[in-house]
Each structure stands twice: as C-alpha cells, then as structure tokens.
Image (spheres, rainbow, N blue to C red):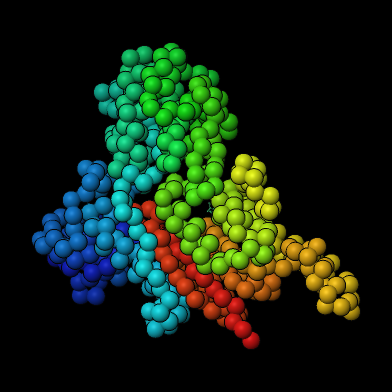
C-alpha cells in the first residue's frame, strides 16, 4: 500500500474512464491525470486508498511514442479535452478497444465473434474545430477585466481562452468583440457567487453547411446598454444570421433562460445533416458534431437496411433527426421522446422537409411503446378467428402494432428492462442500437442476445475527438427459429 506524498516510478499501461493514465507498482494501482499510455513517469501520490490511489504526474522520464504536443496550451487545465496529448490514431485505438472490451467483458461476447463483426472505428480527418456550438461563460479577472473561456476541470474557475481548438475559428472574433465592448462601456460580467453583473454566457452556433452564424447573449437583466453598437459590429461578421438575448435572472447552473428575444436578423439558423434541413434556435437541441453525426446516421440507415415498405420505431428520438433520416426510406416512422419541446422541434423539422410519414409521441419510451403495442395488439386480436387476409388488413390499419426495425438511442443509463421486453415481444426483424456508453450497451445487448437476437455488426463513431467519449452503433438481427 502507498501513502500520501509517496513517490513512485511507473509505466502507464492503461487509460481510465476519464482519460487518465493507469499504472501499477507492486499490485497497487495508480491513476495519473495527463499521463499517456506508454509513458514512464515519476509520480507523487495525492490520495491513497487500500488498493489504489490518485497520483500527480511529476516528471515524464520516458515519453510514450503516442505522446504529442497538445494543440491548445490549456489542454491540461481545461475540463473540455482529456486526450489532446495522445496522438489521434492512438485515441481511436483506445476508443475501439473500450467498445470491444465492454462487449467482451460486460456483455459476455465471444472474442472470435467480435473479431468477425467489429468494423473499423469511424474517425475524423480533421479532429479539431468540429463543434458547431459553444457556450462561453463570462467572468471577471483579478484586475477587474471581463474574461471568457472555459471552466477548469471539475470547477467553475474560468480559464481565459477565446480560442478553443475544438470550436469554430469565428468564436474568437465574436468573443473579442464582446469583451472589447464590455470594457468600453463598463458592462460587468455576471458573478455566480453574488448574483450581480449582467453578461452570463455567450452561446455561439454555426451552420457548418450553410455557414450561418448565431450569437445569443445570456443576461442577468432586461437588456444590454448600448446594444446597438454591439449589434452593428457583430452583424458585420460574414455569415452572421441571428443575434439574440436570453434573459436568465435565476441564480442557477442552468445556462439559458426560458425564452429568447431577437435583437438582429432572425431567431434561428439553418443547417443540414445529409439532405435534411433543420432550423436551430438558441434553445433547440442539435448534435454538436454535424460531420460525424451524418456518418453515424448513415450507419444507422445502413444497418436498418430499409427497402421502403417498413414500419420503423425510433426510440429516444430527440428532435427526430434519426427518424427523419429513416423516413426517407421507410413506409412509416414513429419517434418517441420524453422532452415535449424536442417533439415540437421534430414535428416542425418533418414539416420543413415535407416529410409526412413520420409521427412523434411525447413520453417515456418504456411507457409509450408497451402502451401503444398493447392497445394495437388488442385491436388486432379482438377480431378472433379472422382469416389471415383480414389480419393483414388489420395490420395495415394498425401498423403501430408491428415493427420491422426498432432503433434506440438512449442516454448513458441505457434502455429500461421493460422496454427491452416489449421490443422482444414485438419481434422486429432488426434492432439498431445507438449508444453513448459502451457499458450499458454491453448490458442491453447481452439481454437481447439472450432473447433471440444475434449481434451482427458493430461500428464505433468518434463524435468527440480529444475527449474520452465514444458512440457505438450495433445491429441485432432476429434469429430465424
Ligand atoms: N436520437 C437523438 C437524441 C438521442 S439523446 C439524436 O440523435 O439526436 C437521448 C434522448 O433520449 C434525449 O433527447 C433524452 O431527452 C431522451 N430520453 C431520456 N430518457 C428517455 C426515456 N425514458 N424515454 C424517451 N426518451 C428519453
């Protein structure tokens, strides 16, 4: 066992769930932030438990062959990136192994099967500047000047940096304009502790396809003094489409206010994922990496293998992005999502794209699907002793009782057991599982494999380079009895 302040020399052999390096000395495990797999390092123990401890990286004795200079000089302090000091190729290997390891260890999947069905991870050609959305907090530095940047890991201390390597280059211009304006007119940044000050956050969104730009200032007050001057300068930025304010006077961690007001231009920007067009307001949810999102959705479409006459359910559908992608190739798509505004957006997006074969329901997937299925099945069964042809026509008029393909894209905690049972009862030909957490994916896939489904394909997509997150798409096919 080691004690606080002990020093050790270790080889980093693994990566933890938060991107930290992991090394062992005499069977004792040390977690070392900023250490990269393959590094030989000297560390100092900061916190010691019985079998493991957390240590600080003191000296890199021998750098890993995968260690690179980070693009951003704040990479270590900032909470946004965890892996900038590891080469991108190695990051992809790490993510692929993380998915594979989960399916193997937690999902009880045979290694030979995984050898056969795991497809190469889909990485980015340019793994920087990929985010179309940024929310910059404002604060005041020690000299009283307004600053903006990012929170240091696990704190609310602002690291002054207007030039995040993951964001759009235009962010810097916009933020500098706002800081200069605040200084000139002595407009104070909001202070979380006292609740005083005016400007809380700046939200910037960019349409990567359309090149449209949105700026929304979140303020602790009714308006910004001299705002015409700010609007004039911001509106001269090429692509500027929407300048808004959102009033948030509550002392809360929630960034946005409940509504917004247009100061200049329109209240939304437009962007595309594939052929589908979206109107994005300051309050709408929208995928932050549109380039990789398209690759993920194309994977879903490929795995769903639609011919045009299928009934498809898209559970946890958000603003209906996957549903609308699938609707281009299916007879009917049903989307289910718990957040009512997201469903409003989904319906608007369907209308905007002239898609009329998608229907959306608000509610928990684990409640909506069983209810709908039970009801529809009831309609079918009440016929009693009817001919196959009548059953078929009943099926036609109550298509919700039947599903050819079910897509799920749950949050980190995965699918509810009741939902998985209902899916199995509905017996779709294919289930396409999109997951942001390999551990719950492995758990749910294991349950489905035990109930007549076989895992046929697995493909990870890197939606968030430089971070530890990874998305996975899995195809499960119903076994023929
Ligand atoms: N498929 C969408 C969003 C997936 S994120 C896209 O690609 O953009 C997961 C979504 O599940 C979120 O929108 C969240 O609000 C929703 N959600 C969380 N729990 C849910 C539940 N029990 N039932 C239905 N939706 C849920």
Residue 5, image quadrant: bottom left
Where ligand 1 lies, by quadrant?
bottom right
Taking the spot 31% from the left edge, 26% from the top edge, the residue there is 176
Whether residue 203 is visible to the viewer of this picture, yes or no, is no
Q: Position of residue 200 (x, y in %)?
A: 43, 29
Q: Nearer the viewer, residue 310 or 128?
A: 310
Tell me the residue at 30%/23% (across/down): 145
The quadrant of the picture occupied by the C terminus is bottom right
Q: Is residue 394 above or below residue 149?
A: below
Q: Does 192 appear above or below 152? A: above
Residue 94, percent from left and from top: 31, 65
- Viewer-closest of 441 and 49: 441
Left or right side of 86 for 174: right
Residue sitting at the far left: 61
Q: Is residue 440 left or right of residue 407?
A: left
Residue shown at 44% from the left, 33% from the top: 212
Horizontal relation, residue 391 to residue 106: left or right: right
The quadrant of the rendering that contains the N terminus is bottom left
Q: Which of these two is toward me, 10 or 357?
A: 357
Counting from the top left corner in percent of width and height, residue 162 is at: 30, 33
Nearer the observer, 93 or 348: 348
Q: Residue at position x 35%, y 41% from top?
A: 167
**Residue 430 in sight:** yes
Quarter holding residue 236: top left
Look at the picture and state if 406 lies above or below 210.
Answer: below
């Amino acid at each position: 066992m080691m004690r606080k302040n002990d020093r050790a020399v270790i080889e980093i052999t693994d990566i933890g769930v938060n991107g930290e390096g992991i090394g062992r000395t005499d069977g004792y495990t040390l977690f070392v932030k900023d250490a990269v797999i393959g590094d030989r390092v000297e560390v100092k123990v900061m916190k010691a438990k019985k079998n493991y401890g957390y240590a600080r990286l003191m000296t890199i004795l021998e750098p890993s062959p995968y260690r690179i200079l980070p693009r951003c000089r704040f990479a270590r302090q900032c909470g946004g990136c965890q892996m900038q000091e590891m080469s991108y190729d190695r990051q992809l290997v790490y993510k692929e192994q993380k998915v594979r390891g989960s399916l193997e260890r937690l999902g009880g999947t045979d290694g030979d099967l995984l050898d056969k069905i795991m497809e190469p991870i889909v990485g980015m050609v340019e793994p920087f500047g990929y985010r179309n959305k940024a929310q910059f907090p404002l604060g005041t530095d020690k000299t009283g000047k307004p600053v903006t940047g990012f929170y240091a890991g696990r704190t609310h201390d602002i690291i002054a940096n207007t030039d995040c390597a993951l964001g759009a280059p235009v962010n810097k211009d916009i933020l500098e304009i706002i800081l200069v304006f605040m200084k000139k007119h002595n407009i104070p940044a909001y202070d979380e502790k006292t609740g005083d000050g005016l400007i809380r956050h700046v939200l910037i969104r960019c349409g990567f396809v359309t090149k449209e730009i949105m700026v929304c200032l979140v303020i602790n007050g009714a308006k910004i003094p001299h705002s015409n001057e700010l609007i004039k300068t911001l509106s001269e930025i090429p692509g500027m489409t929407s300048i808004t304010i959102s009033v948030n006077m509550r002392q809360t961690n929630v960034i946005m206010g409940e509504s917004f007001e247009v100061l200049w231009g329109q209240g939304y920007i437009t962007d595309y994922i594939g052929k589908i067009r979206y109107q994005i307001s300051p309050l709408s949810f929208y995928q932050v990496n549109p380039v990789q999102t398209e690759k993920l959705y194309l994977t879903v479409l490929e795995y769903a293998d639609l011919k045009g006459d299928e009934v498809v359910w898209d559970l946890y559908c958000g603003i209906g992005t996957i549903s609308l992608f699938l609707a281009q190739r299916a007879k009917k798509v049903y989307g289910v999502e718990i957040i009512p505004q997201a469903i409003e957006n989904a319906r608007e997006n369907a209308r905007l794209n002239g898609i009329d074969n998608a229907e959306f329901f608000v509610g928990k997937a684990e409640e909506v699907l069983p209810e709908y299925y039970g009801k529809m099945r009831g309609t079918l069964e009440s016929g009693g002793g009817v001919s196959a042809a009548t059953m078929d026509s009943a099926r036609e008029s109550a298509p919700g009782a039947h599903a050819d393909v079910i897509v799920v894209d749950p949050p980190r905690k995965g699918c509810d057991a009741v939902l998985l049972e209902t899916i199995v009862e509905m017996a779709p030909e294919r289930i396409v599982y999109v997951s942001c957490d390999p551990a719950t994916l492995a758990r749910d896939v294991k349950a489905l494999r035990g109930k007549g489904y076989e895992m046929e394909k697995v493909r990870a997509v890197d939606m968030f380079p430089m971070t530890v997150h990874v998305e996975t798409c899995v195809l499960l096919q119903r076994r023929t009895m």
